[in-house]
Amino acid sequence: MKPELTELSAGYLIEWDDQVRANANSFKLHSDGRITAEISIEANYGGSWQHIKKPAIINLSSDITRKRLANDCSERHGGNNLDWYAIIEQLSDKIITKHKTGEEACELSSGSGSKPPEYIMEPFIVKNYPNVFFGDPGSFKSNFAMVLCMIASLPYHDNPLNLDAPDDPLKILWLDWETDRQTVEWAMTRLENGLKPGIFFIQYRKCVYPLKQDVEQIKTSIDKTGADLVVIDSLGLASGGEPKETEPALSFFQALRQLKTTSLIIGHNSKNKEEKTKSIYGNMYYTALARNIWEARKVAEPGEDEIDIALFHRKSPPFSKIQKPFGYKVFFNFDSITISPQDITTAREFVSQLSNNAQIEMFLKEEGPASKQQILEGTGITDANFRQAIKRLKTKDKVVHLPGDNWGLKYNG
């Protein structure tokens, strides 16, 4: 019998006609050159598949171990004249060769045949990329991630956020390190009651161990659920270790790459309150290795049932540009949450997060022609930053220097 190997997210499926099949995962290359893997083997008894070897860690490099496994299988299922020693040898050879070889090199070329990367939901989720939402506790980042999952899973085309839903429904796997099933399900119910999309479904998995330790089991969950998108809530606990250290960050992204799917990662922000632009809390590699990063900010009055939120694009994917910020008004009731788009200029705290160019443009749009001093006082930017920004705006033909040393927006209509 000739074995056929199928690559899965969680490892490999090896099949010998319709008689024997084996699953292999949790591969490990040891310092002494040994390769071990978790192996399970099934045999077909009259059309019914039964376990011959339940999942166990096997040293595939050991001839003695392979012979012992073959004898064990032969004792359990010696019928149909199966050559178990040959089967185990083929199994070991297939896995060792595939694991040592890794991904094959392929030739790339420029030209008309190439295609740009795709968005699952533009501009927030890029397909097959690690996408990050981060912000202060209570900044609506997890709920907003749930809104995106709701829109993508239905798909909800006529949604009140005016976002483009994918053409086909996507399967979502929510990996939860922070709360529990009941909390996530209640959030789904409140959003359904408020936004009226109809019932929507996601797959849920409670997680305890860091991603690098749980990656094989999560890959199995991805295979079983057919997940197109995994949500990781949250980055700190999924990484494990001290957030400011390099090793947890690198291990997290190495494990994430093994999932081979799109990810939406929820993180917290840096603690420095004086920084105008914050970053993901922890080691610099959390920012360096993510490919699309959004910061969530909120403005709320104590005791109020509504908040203003804004999403600022802090890092663009390599094929795109920084996007303009998005603003939303969120209303909370006991059993519902509603959300609608709004201009971010509704809150001064959001305006201060805009670029100096954008702040000057916005001030001149609202106030009309103004002197440099009026602009400085109205925006709060420094004289040096004003000079740089006004120079860029002139180069882009967006402002004009008026008599009386005033500045105004240039009409280009």
Image (cartoon, rainbow, N blue to C red):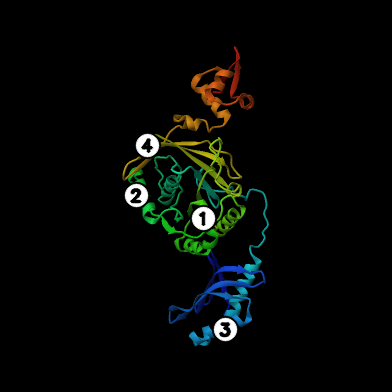
Q: Give whichever of discs 2 and 3 has the lower sequence position.
A: 3
Is residue 168 at all visible to an observer of this figure? yes
Kindly identify which residue carries mark 2.
189
Residue contact at pointers 4 and 1, CB within 8 angstroms: no
Helix, strand or loop status at disc 4: strand
Mark earlier in primary sequence (2, 4): 2
Q: According to the image, label 3 marks what residue?
A: 68
Q: How far apart in space, not on screen, are marks 2 and 3 (Cα)? A: 54 Å
Q: Which one is nearer the viewer's eye here, 111 or 254?
A: 254
Within 10 Å of disc 1 (Cα), the crowding (few <14, some 14-19, many 20+) is many
| Quarter of the view holding residue 101 | bottom right
Which residue lies under the disc numbered 4? 306
Question: Of helix, strand and loop, which one carries label 1?
Answer: helix
Query: Foreground residue, 234 or 390?
Result: 234
The location of residue 384, given as percent across then percent down, is 64, 25
Residue 335, image x, y percentages: 31, 45
**Disc on the earlier residue, 2 or 1:** 2
Q: Marks 2/1: CA distance?
A: 26 Å
CB-based contact (under 8 Å), mark 3 and mark 1: no
Residue type highlighted by circle 4: Glu
Please state the horizontal and vertical placement of residue 183, each as a whole percent of the image.
Answer: 37, 52
Quarter of the picture holding the C terminus: top right
Q: Return the disc, 3 or 4, that comes first in the chain's sequence.
A: 3
> Which residue corresponds to the image point at 42% horizontal and 53% vertical from the top-left?
179
Residue that label 1 marks: 238
Helix, strand or loop under label 3? helix
Secondary structure under badge 2? helix
Looking at marks 3 and 1 on the same chain, the residue that comes earlier in the sequence is marked by 3
Q: Residue at x 52, y 51 (%)?
A: 236
Mark 2–mark 4 CB contact (< 8 Å): no
- Callout in the foreground (2, 1): 1
Q: What residue type is labelled 2?
A: Thr
